[in-house]
Image: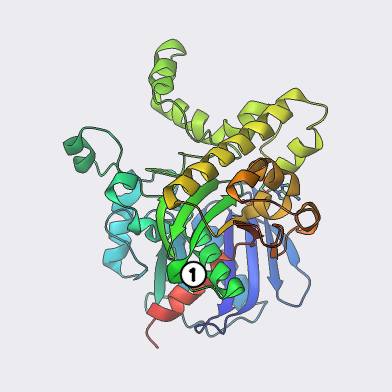
Amino acid sequence: MIEVAGEAASGRDDRKLARALIERIGEEATCEIQLFGEKPARASAKIENHEQAVAYLIRELQGSHGLRNLDAVGHRVVHGGDRFTTSVLITDEVVAALDELTSLAPLHNPPSVSGIRAARAVLGPALPMVAVFDTSFHRTLTAEASSYALPYDLAERHKIKRYGFHGLAHHYSALRYGEITEAPIANSKIVTVHLGNGCSAAAIRGGESVDTSMGFTPLEGLVMGTRSGDLDAAIVTYLARQANLDIAEIENLLNQRSGLLGVSGLSNDMRRLLADYAVNSRARLAVDLFCYRARKYLGAYLAVLGGADAVIFSGGIGENSPLVREKISAGMEWLGLRLDPLKNAVAVGAEARISTDGCGIQAYVIPSDEEALIARETAKLAPR
Ligand code: AMP
């Protein structure tokens, strides 16, 4: 899948101009392009890889949809490793360094790097391009939050630590919370719970990430659509021995065939599982396990922060499912978190406060806008 958003970004004066989405790359792909204020235009095309997808989108946006005169392009890159802890202007050297990071994120970085290559090929290397990393918001994790209890030298040599991901989503939630409440961000303590196909939570103090549930890769932590999240590492070696699985098979099992899909045996789509919740015990188990894990992390992060001002839900599930939010938050009244049933029920896909007036920990739904952050970072770094 490739997603592109055209934005006029200059500080707070962001304006979305268009969005585009290509799915089923490698087959007969479906492409959707929408200029804001207009109906989406859909087409299908033979698109074999991410490079072709980016080239197709840029040509379409510039040609049929008239979005010419680009000033810059911002790229989302999942893993910045130790080297990229803030957004950077892309040069040949940066592209080479991103290639080197492939070993740290073999499943996630190659599509971003091929997207960068394709955009440079179509638009020319003189157009400023900026890489914005999902890891960089978590650069503020302390050593105790970012370390694994592995032999120190081994971890150092192989750069094994908890990098954290979904940084753009968590950062956006924190910034938007500051805007909505007009509370000074320097004093704020919030827990952000991002529940989409990938899911993660973060503990944020004073606008900075202090802990997050994804770790060395985006596999750790919460139960996700097809990813297991936390599990006893000994299961990996046990499966290798007992089920005779090799590394690639185990990687595939944990990333593509676990999570909601693996437990339910039905679907990775939360909507389907909620529809079958009352009639299918495995759909129910998948949903309950999903919510239970999120609840454990919420409790852990309230402990890490010493309480919080607010809990923020985002992502396709967090934004759209009152039931999931209710299951995660239930029974936390003693901590000061109490959802208002009516406010929670009507907050579907829209920004809203969903907690009762005056409770100690407020709860919000804040739809993510990662593209807005990428556009702002790009506008900041691109030479004018
Ligand atoms: P995202 O990756 O943020 O696009 O989120 C995708 C997830 O959101 C999928 O699991 C969808 O099933 C889920 N989702 C979208 N709409 C709803 C909804 N109305 N209720 C529950 N889950 C939803």
Q: Position of residue 150 (x, y in %)?
A: 26, 33
Q: Is residue 169 above or below residue 123?
A: above
Count neighbours of disc 1 (C-alpha within 10 A) and say few if under 14, some if 14 to 19, many if 20 or more: many
Q: How many marks?
A: 1
Query: Quarter-wise, where is residue 36 in the image?
Result: bottom right
Residue 13 or 192: which is nearer the viewer?
192
Rendered image quadrant of residue 240: top left
Spot the residue most to the top.
Answer: 242
Expressed as whole percent of the image width and height from the top left, the position of residue 276 reads: 80, 33
Determine if residue 55 is in view.
no
Q: For the residue marked with disc 1, what is the amino acid?
A: Ile
Q: Nearer the viewer, residue 25 or 339?
A: 339
Residue 271 location in percent, x, y? Answer: 75, 43
Q: Secondary structure at mark 1?
A: helix
136 on left or right of 34 = left
Examine the rendering and report whether any part of residue 148 can be seen: yes
| Position above or below: 109 against 174 | above
In this picture the colour scheme is: rainbow
Q: Nearer the viewer, residue 135 or 306?
A: 306
Q: Which residue is mark 1?
A: 374
Q: Determine the residue positioned at 34% across, 58% down.
A: 140
Identify the residue at image location x=68%, y=27%: 285
> Does 78 sit left or right of 323 as displayed?
left
In percent of the image, x 75 and y 59: which residue is there?
Answer: 347
Q: Is residue 228 above or below residue 213?
A: above
Q: Which image quadrant: the C terminus?
A: bottom left
Residue occupying the far left of the picture: 153
Return the x and y of residue 263 as percentages of the image width and height.
63, 27
